[in-house]
Image: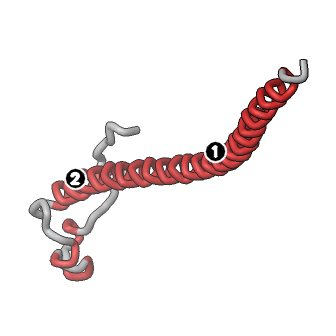
Amino acid sequence: LRSAAPMAEAVVDTLNADMGRVWHNEQVVEGQMRTLTAQTSRMSEQTRAWLRMYTEFHDALKALGDVENWTHVIEQDMLIVAATVDAVQGRPAGVPLESAPATEDMDDDQVYTPLREQGVSSRWR
């Protein structure tokens, strides 16, 4: 029994040393896990902020595209109106108004009058 005691002590010391290393490694892993959790949380917040900024930017681009499309439609409508006025006035299409004779230099039959005063019905009514 006396000879088994030193051997048992050696086994216990070896097991205690191994358990000490395991406990130390567990503490290191838990610290790394807390660090990783904090970094993941910060990254998640950063990603949400980037997503919010992207969404706002995307919405602004869509609105800009809507405005650009609207201006294109208005421009086309105004070209049609200008061509119609030119045709009614007998002016060649595309002549800028600045180069057209001033109203006071025109005869009464050359001055623009609304279509309804000219007896022309509009299909838009």
Along the viewing direction, whichever of 106 and 6 lies nearer the viewer? 6
> Which residue is most to the right?
1
Query: Residue drawn 31% across and 61% down?
Result: 113
In the image: residue 15, left or right of residue 60: right
Q: Is residue 4 above or below residue 20?
A: above
Q: Is residue 103 above or below residue 89?
A: below
Picture coordinates of residue 17 (x, y %)?
75, 37
- Could you tell me which secondary element the residue under label 2 belongs to? helix
Tag 1: amino acid: Thr
All told, the count of numbered labels is: 2
Query: Residue drawn 24% across and 55% down?
Result: 79
Along the viewing direction, whichever of 7 and 80 lies nearer the viewer? 7
Tag 2: amino acid: Thr
> Which residue is most to the top?
1
- Could you tell me which secondary element the residue under label 1 belongs to? helix
Along the viewing direction, whichever of 62 and 53 lies nearer the viewer? 53
Picture coordinates of residue 54 (x, y %)?
50, 50
How are the residues colored?
Answer: secondary structure
- The quarter of the picture where the C terminus appears is top left
Q: Which residue is mark 1?
A: 40
Q: Residues within 10 Å of mark 2 (few under 14, many from 20)?
A: some
Disc on res. 84: 2
